[in-house]
Amino acid sequence: MSPRDEIPNLGSLDGEGSVQVHLDPAEKIEGAKVFSVYGKGGIGKSTTSSNLSAAFAAMGKRVLQIGCDPKHDSTFTLTGRLQPTVIDILKEVDFHPEELRPEDFVTEGWGGVMCVEAGGPPAGTGCGGYVVGQTVKLLKQHHLLDETDVVIFDVLGDVVCGGFAAPLQHADRAVIVTANDFDSIYAMNRIIAAVKSKSANYKVRLAGCIANRSHATDEVDRFCQRVGFERIGHMPDVDAIRRSRLKKKTLFEMEADDDILACRAEYMRLAQQLWRGSDGLDPEPLPDREIFELLGFD
């Protein structure tokens, strides 16, 4: 008997080649607009997520940001400090969630943004999908999603295994953070393929990409034109963004200068565009060889 015969709801229900359990409809996030932020490790996903959360809050929206990384540093610019992870807190109560209160795992950040750090399994053990699932389940049990307008998942690195693709089961739109270089665009191409696979059975679609910490966008734009994708934002490589991380603040809390005001305006424009929504994009990812031919060096 094969594993597919032994375990229900696997495989084609969740994308070609997948061995991830299909999402129970009862665990779906309802009522909020849900965005998943992906991109190459170190590209600035947490900075992007936190400033987008702050921008949505500045629009008057009720926002929840969920960090999906064992480093649990997704929300520290919103709260000014590292938060304990859901998985560690559950361990402390021997995985009896009924013993937890919302304040045990949710911290209010700048602008009233609710901040949660899902965490992740120890290296080489467990599955990130389990952690995401337990976090959403806990939030639903405590009715913390009932009055939420926007949920942002900030997802670990460019990992596109079934576990770290789990937020795509909840998301309306996926946003990819990239830079104007080969490695970032290569990771973006893989993420596009992962979202395309998920979109066969879930409502998630791609909203577009944000060129981050990049003076130019020519390589990103060339890739987007080739595959049918769209750059929806551009955050230049300015020192204000680096300083905001060092000060543990979003750009919306920083003392304003010309660069900070320009960055705030771009995040506000992006948040407004995402809130308005779109039909979603359906780019066709390139085989590896074609990526090298398009962007590689001679």
Image (cartoon, rainbow, N blue to C red):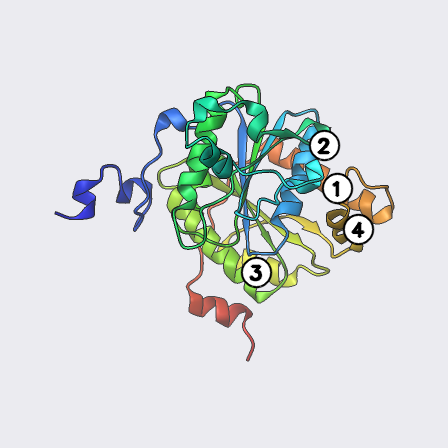
Are discs 4 and 1 less than 8 Å apart at CB? no
Q: Which residue is mark 1?
A: 249
**Is residue 24 shown left or right of residue 151?**
left
What is the three-letter code of the residue carrying label 2? Trp
What is the three-letter code of the residue carrying label 4? Ala
Are discs 2 and 3 less than 8 Å apart at CB? no
If you read the primary sequence from the N terminus, does the residue marked by circle 4 or circle 1 appear first? 4
If you read the primary sequence from the N terminus, does the residue marked by circle 3 or circle 1 appear first? 3
User: Which numbered marker is on residue 240?
Assistant: 4
Q: CA distance from mark 3 to mark 1?
A: 25 Å
Pick the residue in front: 148 or 290: 148
User: Which numbered marker is on residue 184?
Assistant: 3
- The correct choice, above or below, for 101 with respect to 37 in the image is above
Residue at 44% across / 26% down in the picture? 97
Q: Nearer the viewer, mark 3 or mark 1?
A: 1
Are discs 3 and 4 less than 8 Å apart at CB? no
Give the SS element for disc 3.
helix
Are discs 1 and 2 less than 8 Å apart at CB? yes
Give the SS element for disc 2.
helix
